[in-house]
Image (tube, rainbow, N blue to C red):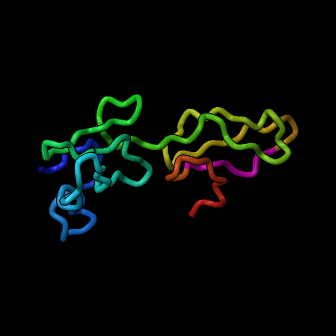
Amino acid sequence: EPLPAVDGAIDPEDLDPALHGAAELCMGLAYGEMCSAIHCPLGSFLAGHFECSGLGDWRPVPAAGEQQVRCVQRLCPEKLPSVPGGGESDQSECTERATGSTCLPVCPPNYEGQGGFVCSNEGTWMPAEDMP
């Protein structure tokens, strides 16, 4: 039986036209095994998985705190990493934390920032100059 649709997921046929849906990638799995053929867009992750039930269909197993299996956008932490020489006051609270967002550190008095941070696709703050 085909896998249920997942909000925000990429159709496997878009990744490889030879595939005919994600269920084809999971054919032959035994009872209790997980299907991991669902791909989420860059900067997001699959919150949960589907498990082969004993009835020949797929049982959704949402991640903790989720109501359904779905693609969830990765967010960076609220606090930036420490900035050398910045002491405690360099901890900016960033309101935009989605992948690709930028955030500038708060510098202590008499210090000037030399750049900011960008939220990577993995959900970590990276110095802007290190991003491609």
At 56% from the left edge and 33% from the top edge, which residue is drawn?
A: 95
Left or right: residue 86 versus residue 7 is right
Residue 115: x, y in percent?
A: 70, 51
Q: Overall secondary structure of the magenta stretch?
A: loop
- Relative to 126, is 17 on the left or the right? left
Residue appearing at x 38%, y 36% in the figure: 63
Hey, which quadrant is residue 94 in on the image? top right
Q: Which residue is more in the foreground, 66 or 79?
A: 66
Q: How many marks?
A: 0
Q: Is residue 4 among what the camera can see? A: no
The magenta segment is 112-119
Residue 22 inside the magenta-drawn segment: no
Residue 55 visible here? yes
- The quarter of the rendered structure image containing the C terminus is bottom right
* 14 versus 78 height, above or below: below
> Where 19 falls versus 6 (above or below)?
below
The front one of 3 and 28 is 28
Residue 80: percent from left, percent from top = 67, 40
Which residue occupies 37% across, 45% down?
46
